[in-house]
Image (cartoon, helix red, strand yellow):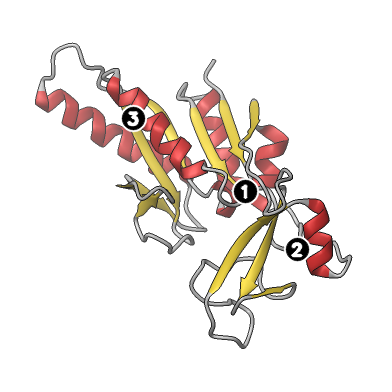
Amino acid sequence: MAKLYFRYGAMNSGKSTALLQAAYNYEERGQHVLLAKPAIDTKGASEIESRLGVTRPVDFLIAPGDDARVLFAEHRQRLQHASDDALLPGRPSDVACLLIDEAQFLTPSQVDDLFRIAVEDGIPVMAYGIRNDFLTHAFPGSARLLAIAHSLEELKTICRCGRKAVFNGRVVGGRFVFDGDQVAIDEGAVGTASPELTTYESLCGTCYLEESGGRLG
């Protein structure tokens, strides 16, 4: 039986890099993959962008109201037809794996779609994302993945102090902030009055509590 995998980590833990490496590994062996990400992630538009500078276009975007399984089926069929038309000897025409970037932005029902793709359609799904927002609350998509994924793997990174980073601090105009909407995509502070650049820093528990004044959530 194919499985749904959730590979998660704090910001800068190499999630997109790991996804692109997985895609390369499949294709190096002559197998097809499909890449997708939520449309809400406007950074990089329709591309997956690694912090190492490697980019690759996605095959499709998943909007909040979309049925992820239907979208996958459409692109799977398109790929099969294209491969059959090309008559590539020895190259399988079906999809070997579906890879999802920024999976935390999926809805819980879309995560259920990924589970069905793995279990009912027989295609492995690898979802990459972060667990918690800047207030330490779980993203709905991540919470659902943690609940139903067959395999969980943490991708580790370190805090500025050298400890393991587990939290994501939001920085606006050079200062940590602890209010605003859950989603702000590195461009502007959604839900705040400030137009300044929004970035994120991976923090350990100790550094997070120091910056938040002891606040969790």
Residue under pointer 2:
135
The amino acid beneath tag 2 is: Leu
Residue at the spot x=28%, y=33% of the render? 77
131 to the left or right of 31: right
Q: Quadrant of residue 215?
A: bottom right
The amino acid beneath tag 3 is: Tyr
Residue under pointer 1:
130
The amino acid beneath tag 1 is: Ile
Residue at the spot x=73%, y=75% of the render? 179
Frontmost residue, 181 versus 172 = 172
Q: Position of residue 79 (x, y in %)?
A: 25, 33
Asked whether the beta carbons under mark 2 and mark 1 sit within 8 Å of each other, the answer is: no
Residue under pointer 3:
24
- For label 3, the crowd category at 10 Å Cα-Cα, with few meaning under 14, some 14 to 19 and many 20 or more, is some
Q: Position of residue 74 (x, y in %)?
A: 33, 40
Label drawn at residue 152: none
Secondary element at image label 3: helix
